[in-house]
Amino acid sequence: MWRSTNKDYIRTYLPLSAELIRTKGTTWITYPSKNKKARNDTLLASIETTSKIADGISGIEEYEAEGKRVFAGWFNTVAGQQHVFSLEYRTRFLASYDYPAEGALYRFIFQKQSGINSIVDISIQAPEGYMFKETFQEDYHIHFSTDPKSYEIKLTIVPRTE
């Protein structure tokens, strides 16, 4: 319906070792009982067996799909207004990995369904003691005021130089 509240669903696919630290901007949704027909779908069945509420405050759901840890949730955006969603996580693999001197590749892919334009801010922080070779900084930030449908970030993690 025109000028009505947008009901948005977001999924973030991360390495299996990812741990949720905090999230903001989601809305609790109560799900109806699961449909028996879904049990006949192997992908849905595998998701349902790993599904749990990861954060009791925000209602973020956590499950495994396609070899990734997925954090998913709903939020509402009032027509004509903006809404901020944030997700902070840590990946134990990255935090404990002994990076080679030439660096290790970190890859982040942002994809969005078509629809209304969105302002997107992405912030990435290197593990403690490391930086990104491309920026010589410990953090990377990019802002889109126009709506990207797909964007890939490739950063090389190297030991921080003093």
Image (cartoon, helix red, strand yellow):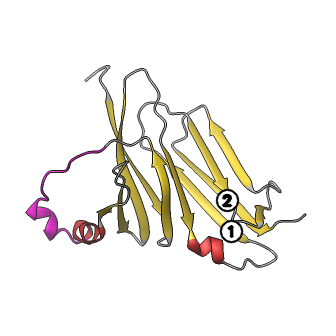
- Magenta part of the chain: 28-42
Q: Nearer the viewer, residue 110 or 126?
A: 126
Q: Answer left or right for 84 relative to 64.
A: right
Rendered location of residue 91, percent (x, y): 56, 68
Query: In terms of sequence position, does the residue under pointer 2 or pointer 1 come before the other?
Result: 1
Residue 47 to residue 53: above or below: below
| Helix, strand or loop for disc 2 | strand
- Cα separation between marks 2 and 1: 7 Å
Residue 11 to residue 76: above or below: below
Q: Residue furthest toward the front?
A: 57
Specify whether residue 73 is painted magenta: no
Q: Nearer the viewer, residue 137 or 105?
A: 137
Q: Answer left or right for 81 relative to 91.
A: left
Residue annotated with mark 2: 154
Query: Most prominent secondary structure in the magenta stretch?
Result: loop
Residue annotated with mark 1: 105
Rendered location of residue 56, percent (x, y): 34, 54
Q: Nearer the viewer, residue 100 or 29?
A: 29
Q: Assign the C terminus to one quadrant of the image.
A: bottom right
| Helix, strand or loop for disc 1 | strand
Q: Assign the N terminus to one quadrant of the image.
A: top left
Q: Marks 2 and 1: CB-CB under 8 Å?
A: yes
Rendered location of residue 79, percent (x, y): 37, 22
